[in-house]
Amino acid sequence: MGASGKPPVDGSAGAPLLEVSGLVKHFPVLQGFLLKRQVGAVRAVDGVDFAVREGEALGLVGESGCGKSTTGRLVTRLLEPTAGRIAYRGRDITHATRKQLAPVRSEIQMIFQDPYASLNPRQTVGAIVSGPMEINGIDPPGGREKRVRELLETVGLNPEHYNRFPHEFSGGQRQRVGIARALGLSPKLIVADEPVSALDVSIQAQVVNLLRELRRERGIAFLFIAHDLAVVRHFSQRVAVMYLGRIVETGDRDALYRRPRHPYTHALLSAAPEPDPDAQGRERIRLAGDVPSPVDPPSGCRFRTRCWKARDKCAAEEPPLTRVEGNAEGHLTACHFPEEPTVVRDRTVVLDPALAALEEGTPQEEET
Amino acid sequence: MTTATEDRPTGPPEGTPGTEPFLSVRDLRVRFATEDGLVKAVDGLSFDLPRGRTLGIVGESGSGKSVTNLAVLGLHDPRVTTVTGDILLDGRELTHAPRRALERLRGNTMSMIFQDSLTALSPYYTVGRQIAEPYRKHTGASRARARRRAVEMLGRVGIPRPERRVDDYPHHFSGGMRQRAMIALALVCDPELLIADEPTTALDVTVQAQILDLLADLQRERGTAIVFVTHDLGVVAGVCDEVLVMYAGRCVERGTVRDILKSPRHPYTWGLLGSLPRMTDDADEPLRPIPGTPPSLLTPPPGCPFHPRCPYRDQVPDDRCRVERPPLAPEGGGRASACHLPDERVRELTPGAVR
């Protein structure tokens, strides 16, 4: 199903904890009154392969609508996959029943983006954090309340706040409550879906550091979903870039950030703002428009409609996710005409019609 | 390199002849009466902005950035808000201006781009009609001419096939296109002052880069003065000439974009820069966040509002940070910072505090 048809080959050792291959999720588009007919499908995730090893953080980056959050929800089985295979510790859980999933569920936890919406406003923090333990019948020595207080302390909250309600906390503190809840079951894998994007920078750094410590000290593996490339770089050992339901490039952090090959990765990196007035020598790429609709994705390479290198071959043939010549082991790129492996170059690519017109100083022409 | 920083001289200091401030704010105070007490959202803020330049206002949520802008536009509800101080737009006093006078200015001489384009645009009217409305109101143009103007503006901000998209509703547009439509709406009357309140925060990076470049290019073409509110110092580097760092309703540091990003003086600015993950630093090093959370504006801490979170407060003798509010001390060249740390300590600490 996927581009390569098999899970990506990862260079380094370490037992794979989660293996995903050919994962597909299509949401049906229904039309009609009373008798609904399916007229199409939103191809949110369309053949994705990756693996997360024990204690490792894999960053999943992409723009909104690229399917990264859907992927996270499929992995935690909050959504039912349309096709493909999800294996946890070698066990197929793609279509496992509730009962079969029960022992696995406690090992895979999730942290959500919106700390306002993901905590029940009617429950105290104590009830929120101890809830999953109750459901999973976990009775820690010394009782659940003691454990909750320990967890609150671990995530940097005052254990005295056990009886407070979510609205009494700030956004960053609420996100910490969410993290404490996820830690309650001693998970092996945490799927963190944009855990810091709703927070202020200073608070964001606190939470990123907290998650880093947890990963190091407890050996928890992370699937870290985010759109902020700099945050992902600071958290993940390996990174996968998604575009319109597919992984277009994946590799070690350094390989991907220093020697990107896919034009889309280049565009993303060049667009990430840097707080340096002398950020000279960085490439400047301005794509035109937005991501196309996943209902009717472009044929062949999905990025071709916004790519400055697109040729006939890109429309006809879908590029496989493979190791391009000159790439390190485990650095896979899905492109027919990969870029030079550097982020420094003098060329600028401006595809945006309004920008190009303004910058050339030519009178504005109307688009046809 | 972004176009925004290209061929732009570093900011001339305030008061330099020839750069008369177009917008001048003096000792602005905005207070809200709430059930819990009086909130001092903005507490004595002053700044100047000449034509053709961009002032960045940076700070965390609740630092008073947006409240300042709404005060400039005169959009606060007078029943619950008291606004004092002077706001001078091209020499005209706005703080006590009558509603009618402000209405003539809003959307015409000054306009605003909001963060959330989905809530800022009305879902009831077509995009074209919403862009044409202020143009008709302020210029008295006919319906047909205003519509042509709307098409022209949509084309200018890079909406493909503007003559067709002009009749679409906001929900037909993607997030990036809606933000472009908002910019078209804000620029339709050729404003001289544009207030952009986190205009790209909700957008993806690739779209954000397009929008920032677009604003910079439009500014270069027309010499608009821009107030750019953001919490992202990375965005500041690309678009602003001068930067004002706000904390708890006050300016704690200001200077040119180079001053603030390269040699910041205030521990809060150090903290903001230290918390920011960068593409070039050592990714295995932990980030250096500011401890604690921003203060409540109902009961702001005594002395320096930043002292509860400041790692350097013990280096100031006599507990001054806890008792005495540091004044915003000008240092020449438009630079100023409000901190009790002596200058030589600041110079020693800066290299370590800023990576």
Image (cartoon, grey):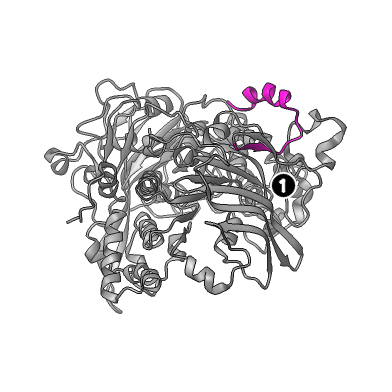
**Front in this rendered view, residue B85 or B287:** B85
**Front in this rendered view, residue A291 or B80:** B80
Instruction: Specify start and end residues of the magenta stretch as a single range.
Output: B334-355
Where is residue A324 shown, x and y percent of the image?
A: 25, 26
Q: Is residue A283 above or below residue A162?
A: above
Which chain letter goes with mark 1?
A
In the rendered image, residue B347 lying in the magenta stretch gets the answer yes
Where is residue A356 shown, x and y percent of the image?
A: 26, 44
Looking at the picture, which amino acid does disc 1 mark?
Answer: Val
In the rendered image, residue A184 lying in the magenta stretch gets the answer no
Name the image quarter holding residue B171: bottom left
Where is residue B109 shown, x and y percent of the image?
A: 45, 61
Compared across the picture, whether A40 is left or right of A236 comes to left
Q: In this view, does B286 lie above or below A169?
A: above
Name the image quarter holding the N terminus of chain B: top left
Disc 1: CA contacts within 10 A as few (<14), some (14-19) or many (>=20): many
Q: Can residue B134 be seen in this view?
A: yes
Name the image quarter holding the C terminus of chain B: top right
Q: Mark 1 points at which residue?
A: A148
